[in-house]
Amino acid sequence: MHKPAVQKRCGRPKITCLLHQEGNTVTERTVSVYMREMKLCSVVSKPYCVQTTDSKHDNPNAPNTLNQNFKVLKPNTVWVTDITYFPR
């Protein structure tokens, strides 16, 4: 039997496993019944999903005025960026 990582959110399988580790004999269904009686439910985190902008639009793309020329004479005349996705 696997050892679940406790992260302050437990569902029926994790609670059952923890009870078995403590020496209690109980089934997942019994834990489920008790959880329902106590109005407890597990918290399920949503899977990470990248959300991007709609690329099928009629708006024109910004012109490439830099044209890969990264050498500038003064600071703050050219800015570049990178797109990085962070999970919520």
Image: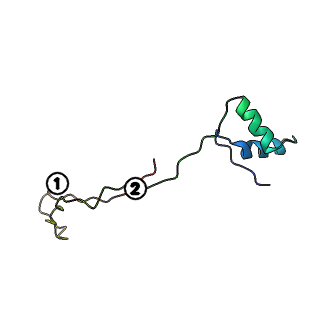
Question: Which one is closest to the eye, mark 1 or mark 2?
Answer: 2
Q: Is residue 21 left or right of residue 32?
A: right
Task: Mark 1: give few (<14), some (14-19) or many (20+) Cα within 10 Å.
Answer: few
Figure quadrant of residue 64: bottom left
Q: Is residue 56 left or right of residue 1?
A: left
In the rendered structure, find residue 76 and report the number of the disc placed on it: 1
Q: Is residue 83 left or right of residue 16?
A: left
| Whole-number angstrom distance, CA of label 1 to CA of label 2 | 25 Å
Q: Earlier in the sequence, mark 1 or mark 2?
A: 1
Q: Nearer the viewer, residue 64 or 71?
A: 64
Q: Nearer the viewer, residue 86 or 51?
A: 51
Q: Which residue is mark 2?
A: 85
Q: Is residue 18 left or right of residue 58?
A: right
Helix, strand or loop at disc 1? loop
Residue at 71% x, 49% y is 4
Tally of marks? 2
Figure quadrant of residue 44: top right
Q: Is residue 47 above or below residue 18?
A: below
Residue at 72% x, 45% y is 14
Helix, strand or loop at disc 2? loop
Residue at 11% x, 62% y is 73
Figure quadrant of residue 7: top right
